[in-house]
Image (tube, rainbow, N blue to C red):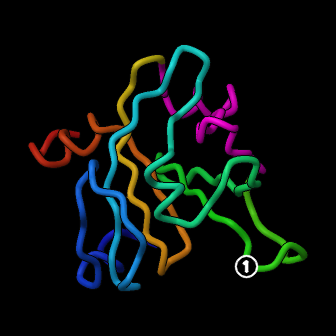
Amino acid sequence: MGASAIAPELSVRANAEIRHWTDGNEADLHVSTMDAHGRLPLRGPALAMGWSPGQDLALVVRDGVLLLSSPLQPAQPRSGITVVLDSRWRLLLPYGIRVHSGLEFGIRLMVLAAPIEGLAAALPVSRVVSAFLGRS
């Protein structure tokens, strides 16, 4: 799913505001910084998605974008690898994914939580800036 497929339908709120969802056509935009242990804080996006600490999530990397989702039913098969939100709402990104994706300590990631899509997506801020400025 590309951003162009969902962008016309979504209004985006900025980081500081966290509230209960009243309209299914909204998305939440956050910026998170990966720590030295490879953990990504996701409290805001997780709250927007209705996720809680200890919950299993499916992680898929597609075109350099980290995609997180939760199955609708526990028995439903899902693609990707299983990751878990820790008690402090952080997600430990597996070492292989960090290396393959070039994610290093201190990297800032834009995280878009789209509850109606059942998906959160994260990509490096530097990639967004490069695309905005027309660099590859």
Name the spot of residue 78 as percent of width and height, x first: 78, 68
Magenta-colored stretch includes residue 85: yes
Magenta-colored stretch includes residue 88: yes
Drawn side of residue 37 relative to residue 134, left or right: right
Q: How many marks?
A: 1
Drawn side of residue 39 relative to residue 121, left or right: right
Name the spot of residue 135 as percent of width and height, x first: 16, 39
Which type of secondary structure does the marked residue at label 1 adopt? Answer: loop
Q: Is residue 29 above or below residue 115?
A: above
- Judging by the rendered image, the residue that carries numbered circle 1 is 72
Name the spot of residue 24 as percent of width and height, x first: 40, 85
Which of the 4 image quadrants contains residue 12?
Answer: bottom left
Looking at the image, which residue is at 63% across and 54% down? 60
Kind of residue indicated by mark 1: Leu
Drawn side of residue 133 relative to residue 38, left or right: left
Q: Quadrant of the C terminus?
A: top left
Looking at the image, which residue is at 42% across and 71% down? 20
Q: Is residue 86 above or below residue 120?
A: above
Q: Nearer the viewer, residue 119 or 52?
A: 52
Q: Residue furthest right?
A: 75
Name the spot of residue 33 as percent of width and height, x first: 40, 29
Drawn side of residue 125 relative to residue 132, left or right: right
Which of the 4 image quadrants contains residue 9?
Answer: bottom left
Q: Which residues are magenta?
A: 82-104
Q: Is residue 109 above or below residue 16?
A: above
Q: Residues within 10 Å of mark 1 (few under 14, many from 20)?
A: few
